[in-house]
Amino acid sequence: MRRAWIALAVLALAAPAAADPLLDRLVADARTVGPDDFAWTRTSKAEQRSGGEAKTSTRVERYDPSRPAGQRWTLVSVDGKPPSADEARDYARAMADAMVPSYGRVAGYFGGGAQRAAVGGRTVFRAGRLPKRALMLNKSDLSASARAEAVVADGARPFVERLDIVTTKPVRMMLVAKIDRMEATSRYKLMPDGRPVLTEQVSDMHGSMMGKAGSMRTVMTYSDHRAVTKAQPN
């Protein structure tokens, strides 16, 4: 009898968590929305603090996947002025292999499963550890040191309305940089064709560079969305 109970316990521990139909649907829907489905304008406002000093900057850029590869990113302005030749050249080089943000990335965060909870009458999914390469920053993989929480909007087509990502421990990058804590919030809305798009990203980072402590807060707003590909039928 004792061996039977031990065998049952081992099977219970080995058994996969029960599937969640809503989470499965959210992940499946996210996988149908790719980075080349919409063109948009992004306005980024950053404030960097270090050593008691603060530096702010504003950048406006346009992403259009209907243009040829290598011409999809356009730097519109820097601090309210057209970019200089050097700024435009450096921008083009930096964005040559840049990750294109889209709702589709939700699938990467929660494709490995999550726990469901009810908070304030809303459905919330929490992933205690992200799959590899789900969270990349300057080519560094922070996935193993972060958790994610998704707030679901109900309706005929449920979607993730808000996504929060928080690092759970300090992370070193490029040997000379260290992130003590990072918090990022993304918000989405439905387009007329029923596909979700990114509308805002707010991130706060605290850490050090070359041993000098500092922080950076960035607010990115996405506007002027234009569908480039048609929505797939449900």
Image (cartoon, helix red, strand yellow):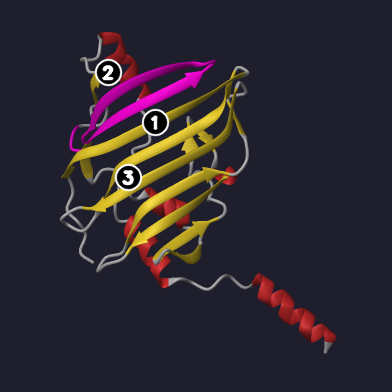
The amino acid beneath tag 1 is: Thr
For image coordinates 40% across by 24% down, the residue present is 47
In the rendered image, the residue lying farthest to the bottom is: 1
The correct choice, above or below, for 221 with respect to 90 in the image is below
The magenta stretch spans residue 176: no
Q: Name the residue beneath numbered marker 1.
A: 218
Q: Are marks 1 and 2 in contact (CB under 8 Å)?
A: no
- Nearest the viewer among 35 and 195 is 195
Q: Are marks 1 and 3 in contact (CB under 8 Å)?
A: no
The magenta stretch spans residue 56: yes
> How many labels, in total?
3
The correct choice, above or below, for 184 with respect to 16 in the image is above
Left or right side of 92 for 208: right
Whichever of callouts 1 and 3 sits on the residue coming sooner in the sequence is 3
Q: Name the residue beneath numbered marker 2.
A: 78
- Nearest the viewer among 82 and 205 is 205
For image coordinates 77% across by 84% down, the residue present is 5
Q: Name the residue beneath numbered marker 3.
A: 102
Query: How many angstroms separate mark 2 from mark 3 (CA)?
Result: 23 Å
Q: Which residues are magenta?
A: 41-67
Depth check, mark 1 against mark 3: the one in front is 1
Depth check, mark 1 against mark 2: the one in front is 1
Residue 28 x %, y %: 36, 62
| Quadrant location, the C terminus | bottom left
The amino acid beneath tag 3 is: Ser
Whichever of callouts 1 and 2 sits on the residue coming sooner in the sequence is 2
Q: Secondary structure at mark 1?
A: strand
Visible in this render: residue 73? no
